[in-house]
Image (cartoon, rainbow, N blue to C red):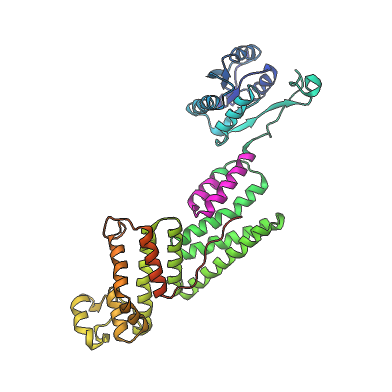
Amino acid sequence: MMPIDSEAMTKTMIMSLGGSPEPLLKSIVSHRPGNIIFLASHDSVALAGNILSKLDFKPSMAYEITDDPNIMFECYKKARCCVERAKKLGVAPENVIVDYTGGTKVMTAALILATIGQPFQFNYVGGELRNKDGLGVVMDGHEKMFAEMNPWSIFAEEERRQVVTLFNRRRFSAVMQIIDHCSTRELPLEIMSYFGFVRPFAEGFLFWEQFQHETALRKISDGMERLATYLKVNRDPDLETFGFQAEQCRLFLRQLLSDTDYMKVLHPVLIDDLLNNARRRMVDKRYDDAAARIYRALELYGQVCFHEVAGCDTDSMNPDMIPEKIREEYIRKYLDTKKNVLKLPMTATFEYLKVKGHPAGIRFFERHQVIKKIQSNRNASILAHGIQPVSEKAINSIFETVTEFVQFTKIFDFPALP
């Protein structure tokens, strides 16, 4: 009996066992594995001895036996045990070969379902010549290896569908994880190209959600280029619409960065960005996150108006520039004695604007009682100073009040993949 070479010792086969031994024997001889794990039934387990007796080498053999080869869940559980056995052997995943030739149809399906998410190789032994006028089993001596019959391509299409669903729910991190996992396998060219443009879009919109606007712009621009390349080969009107909508987002980002000198200066566009971000959090039912963004938009609105009037930021105000009517109070409450500047909180910012006759200050105190409720809800939030979650009713009221006050009109959404 010939020994197993060192390369074969690194290979493991997982095989569904049943039917004619010849196709299974052909597969084993071709791959010469050091280990074989059989998914078998009580009736088919004896077939392994028949196969082993015809080999000129002796692999290590193990068995997972299903009590009923015609019940999918029973077969699937045992197929999963085969996967766990293979992992414990310490063989590199790319050196695990799954052969789903033998066994009942249910066993074959279960083995594919149990292994399809793994970076294994797949193999199937068929043939061109069958008995029973071509309708029966492959005749001995006419077996043919079909290593290219890899179910991964079908699984990849299902993963693509999952990517679309998650992308449209703004689960961008999950999208990236799925694509990265799929990319460890050999994918059909169309799906690989599809993932090629979706991933930078997902990453770009994720960075945007995290207010990393410059990086977001770069990633979305990359996605636009890759989408254009994809559409040259795969014409799709719905994806062309997606591309148009993504371009509007890219233009908004580019304008935001220009208006803020790459996030160095305040600008009203940041208020629009915050409130649109808050809208997305509300749709996702993340109300505390939304409340923090809405409150910051209100505060930022005051800071933008303040800068227009005073020519400086609210945390660097010269006390001499405060109107005499409120100067003494402001110095007493808000003076940073080390730097000799005033650092104004939100209400004090709007009070300054009111004294200066700015419409934002006047409107703020016309709505002061309603805005105080917003402050109270925000302060009670577990993401601020309290331990209470913000309710859906409260967030809708907060959003309506603030958007009306800051005169928010530039509503936009991230594009949805078709």
- Depth order, front residue of 3/318: 318
Residue 26 in which image quadrant: top right
Location of the C terminus by quadrant is bottom right
Identity of the residue drawn at 51% across and 68% down:
253
Based on the picture, tell me whether residue 172 belongs to the magenta stretch: yes
Provide the major secondary structure of the magenta segment: helix
Give 388 or 181, whichever is nearer the viewer.
388
Magenta stretch: includes residue 179: yes
Q: Where 383 sits versus 130, above or below? A: below
Instruction: Give the left or right position of residue 64, taking residue 142 as reference.
Output: left
Q: Is residue 65 visible?
A: yes
Q: Is 402 rendered above or below residue 324?
A: above
What stretch of residues is rendered in magenta? 154-180
Figure quadrant of residue 186: top right
Quick check: 261 left or right of 72? left
Q: Residue at x 53, y 32 (%)?
A: 92
Residue 316 shows up from this direction: no
